[in-house]
Image (spheres, rainbow, N blue to C red):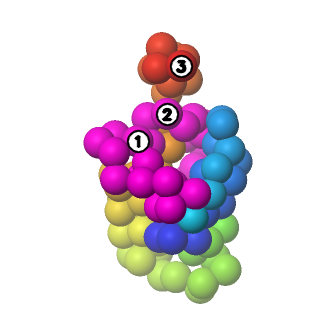
Amino acid sequence: METCYTLMYAEAEPPTTLEKLIVSGEGKEKQFFMKYYLDMDRQIEIINEVAKANKLTKYDTKTLRGSVLLGASPNSCRETWEKLQ
């Protein structure tokens, strides 16, 4: 999951790093991920790339996808993200 989040936040608008989110304490804020945007299709591509690189089974890939997307992945709705800016 960490690799997925690292790649997602690096490509998000605005880009950031997991280290910055942790060190600054921002990652502890409620719904901090809503301040960052990354298209859902790209998020799924990243998850699939990570799954392929780690030779995950279809079941494990599906589990990873659910965990990442329901976890702290960036906001995937541009309209909502723009309202928060």
Q: Kindly report the distance in space between the C-alpha atoms of the residues bearing marks 3 and 2.
A: 7 Å
Residues at circles 3 and 1 in contact by the CB criterion of under 8 Å: no
What residue do we see at 35% from left, 62% from top? 67
Q: Which residues are magenta?
A: 20-46
Query: Are there few (<14), some (14-19), or many (20+) residues within 10 Å of tag 3?
Result: few
Numbered-mark total:
3
Element at label 1: helix
Can the viewer see residue 64? yes
**Residue 58 coordinates in the image, percent (x, y):** 46, 74
What residue do we see at 36% from left, 69% from top? 63
Element at label 2: helix
The answer to which image quadrant residue 33 occupies is top left
The answer to which image quadrant residue 53 occupies is bottom right
Magenta stretch, main secondary structure class: helix
Q: Is residue 48 left or right of residue 64?
A: right
Query: Are there few (<14), some (14-19), or many (20+) residues within 10 Å of tag 2?
Result: some
**Residue 20 coordinates in the image, percent (x, y):** 58, 57
Q: Is residue 51 left or right of residue 68?
A: right
**Residue marked by disc 1:** 32
For the residue marked with disc 3, what is the amino acid? Answer: Gln
Element at label 3: loop
Q: From this view, report whether residue 49 is shown above or below residue 35.
A: below
Q: Kindly report the distance in space between the C-alpha atoms of the residues bearing marks 2 and 1.
A: 6 Å
For the residue marked with disc 1, what is the amino acid? Answer: Phe
Residues at circles 2 and 1 in contact by the CB criterion of under 8 Å: yes
**Residue 12 coordinates in the image, percent (x, y):** 64, 43
**Residue marked by disc 2:** 35
**Residue marked by disc 3:** 85
The answer to which image quadrant residue 34 occupies is top left
Q: Is residue 60 left or right of residue 37?
A: left
Residue 29 colored in magenta in the image: yes
Instruction: Answer with mark 3 or mark 2, whichever residue precedes in sequence.
Output: 2
